[in-house]
Amino acid sequence: MADHIASGRRWRMRIAYLLIALGVVYLQLLPFQTMPRGWAGPDLLVVLTVAWATRRPEYVPVLAVGVVFLLADLILLRAPGLLAAIMVIARQTLRRQSLILRDAPFPTEWATAAATLVAIMLAERLALTIFLVDRAPLGLSVMQLFMNILFYPLVVMASHLILGLRKSAPGDDDTLAGAT
């Protein structure tokens, strides 16, 4: 019975992740401004995925991450599959670290997420440079990185307050060993 309840919650949270991610992609398509901005806001899809993968990786299946980011790459006219591949690798890395982070205080979790966000930005810029693809100016990328790091606690707090997303506890029924 407890396994059935845990499985139901797991699937509800997976569906919630997909709906929120698709909502974020939809909001990125809306023309809020017609002129290019001189500043860069956070990439909420990346921050959301990093936050959920750090706290409860079983709620963020690797296939869902790959599909959502591939769809976002295609819709937002980015290098197809590049950010999807980087985010799948980042999700798997965070899944391995989630057992260590579940007992860690929030500043340690935030520092781990910040290091992951830095690695994501550097990997994306390196790949775009190697393949001679145009990329955003370094200043805008760094600004977006700092915005991502600053928005991480807000995304975690909103996920916790609205959806009840919390770190897994040692006695939780959700197993990380079988999560994909």
Image (cartoon, helix red, strand yellow):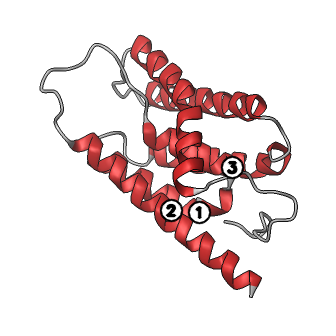
Point out the frontmost of discs 2 and 3: 3
Q: Position of residue 83 (x, y in %)?
A: 47, 42
Q: Which residue is mark 1?
A: 61
Q: Position of residue 67 (x, y in %)?
A: 44, 60
Q: Count the marks: how many? A: 3
Q: Which residue is mark 3?
A: 55
> Sequence-wise, which precedes: disc 1 or disc 3?
3
Q: The disc labelled 3 sits on which kind of residue? A: Arg
Q: Are marks 2 and 1 in contact (CB under 8 Å)?
A: yes
Q: Nearer the viewer, residue 25 or 76?
A: 25
Along the horizontal axis of the image, is 74 left or right of 171?
left
Q: Which residue is mark 2?
A: 64
Q: Nearer the viewer, residue 166 or 96?
A: 166
Other residues around mark 3 within 10 Å, as few (<14) / some (14–19) / many (≥20): many
Q: Position of residue 132 (x, y in %)?
A: 39, 26
Q: Residue at x 45, y 16 (%)?
A: 143
